[in-house]
Image (cartoon, helix red, strand yellow):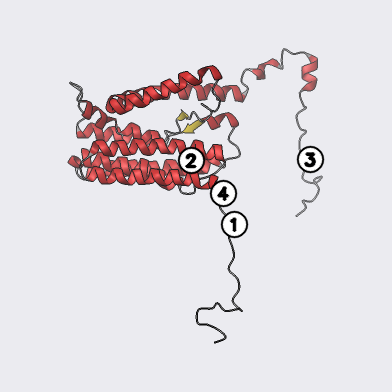
């Protein structure tokens, strides 16, 4: 037999061979995939009533999200489905956890709060993706988020459950208060509030601070494992208390960039400074004297 049945046709065009994918582009995607698995698992645990493990899965997803961004910047790689994973992990999952925990007592009203939170998280992520390519954004503004970021919103909105596990005497979140708190965090995510991002923090560590940094990190991890609800409650309250300081820092940098103070120096600098200032453009010529526009 000249042509066996499984022999490829000689006239068939050869398939295109794709180039090998660099490992540095796979690592951020693998981390994002693990975070997505953690977020989906938290939904299952919330349905089963194991809220403590569901919250742990959300915190783990937030840690992986932070590592994903830093690893992507270090390796100069990208994660193609990062926004989709963040929407599930920090929008859908926290809303469902709150609903299965207490908002279901409000029936349809509680479900509306969960949907609004998830929707605001999706809008927040969409605005973040659009603002990345904004050419008019100043360089100093890259150190601030516009609105509360989705991972911080997910960790913050779960504060009522943290306090519920601590069982602080006299501190109780009824369902209507949880409803209002969920809507407030959702509005903070889609607001125009400048929030310090900390992207430039930790890029360089002085040599003499390496050992203290290791000790502090180990201490925080140990406290989070031993006293998770207390650490998460205190961290959430500190984060909410620092939001006004981020807004004031942004306004200070914005006023400095606008040049409100240096603009008053031209009047006192004398003739030399006046000569350095470019003259105002002359008035445009009349319509009869303008040359024809070239199309």
The residue that appears at 46% across and 29% down in the rendered structure is: 195
Q: How far apart are marks 3 and 4 (CA)?
A: 59 Å
In which quadrant is the C terminus drawn? bottom right
Q: How far apart are marks 3 and 2 (CA)?
A: 45 Å
Label 4: how many Cα within 10 Å (few below 14, some 14–19, many 20+): few
Label 3: how many Cα within 10 Å (few below 14, some 14–19, many 20+): few
The residue that appears at 46% across and 25% down in the rendered structure is: 247
* Residue bearing the label numbered 3: 285
Q: Distance between the residues labelled 3 and 1?
A: 59 Å
Looking at the picture, does residue 50 appear above or below residue 276? below
| Tag nearer the camera, 3 or 1 | 1
Q: Distance between the residues labelled 2 and 1?
A: 31 Å
- Tag 4's secondary structure? loop
* Residue bearing the label numbered 1: 19
- Tag 2's secondary structure? helix
* Residue bearing the label numbered 4: 22
N-term mark: 4 or 2: 4
N-term mark: 3 or 1: 1
């Amino acid at each position: 037999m000249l042509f066996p049945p499984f022999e490829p046709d000689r006239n068939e065009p050869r398939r295109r061979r794709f180039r090998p994918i660099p490992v540095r582009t796979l690592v951020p995607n693998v981390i994002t995939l693990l975070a997505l698995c953690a977020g989906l698992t938290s939904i299952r645990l919330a349905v089963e009533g194991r809220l403590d493990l569901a919250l742990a899965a959300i915190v783990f997803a937030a840690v992986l999200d932070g590592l994903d961004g830093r690893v992507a910047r270090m390796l100069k790689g990208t994660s193609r489905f990062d926004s989709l994973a963040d929407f599930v992990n920090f929008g859908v999952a926290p809303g469902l956890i709150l609903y299965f925990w207490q908002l279901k007592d409000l029936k349809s009203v509680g479900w509306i709060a969960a949907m609004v939170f998830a929707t605001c998280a999706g809008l927040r992520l969409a605005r973040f993706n659009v603002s990345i390519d904004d050419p008019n954004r100043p360089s100093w503004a890259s150190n601030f988020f516009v609105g509360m970021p989705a991972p911080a919103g997910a960790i913050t909105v779960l504060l009522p459950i943290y306090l519920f596990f601590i069982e602080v005497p006299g501190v109780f979140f009824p369902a209507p208060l949880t409803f209002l708190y969920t809507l407030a965090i959702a509005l903070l995510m889609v607001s125009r509030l400048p929030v310090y991002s900390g992207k430039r923090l930790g890029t360089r560590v002085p040599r003499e601070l390496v050992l203290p940094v290791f000790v502090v990190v180990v201490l925080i991890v140990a406290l989070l494992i031993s006293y998770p609800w207390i650490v998460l409650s205190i961290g959430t309250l500190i984060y909410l208390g620092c939001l006004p300081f981020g807004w004031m820092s942004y306004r200070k940098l914005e006023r400095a960039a606008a040049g409100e103070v240096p603009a008053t120096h031209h009047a006192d600098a004398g003739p030399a400074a006046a000569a350095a200032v470019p003259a105002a453009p002359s008035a445009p010529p009349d319509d009869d004297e303008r040359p024809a526009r070239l199309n």
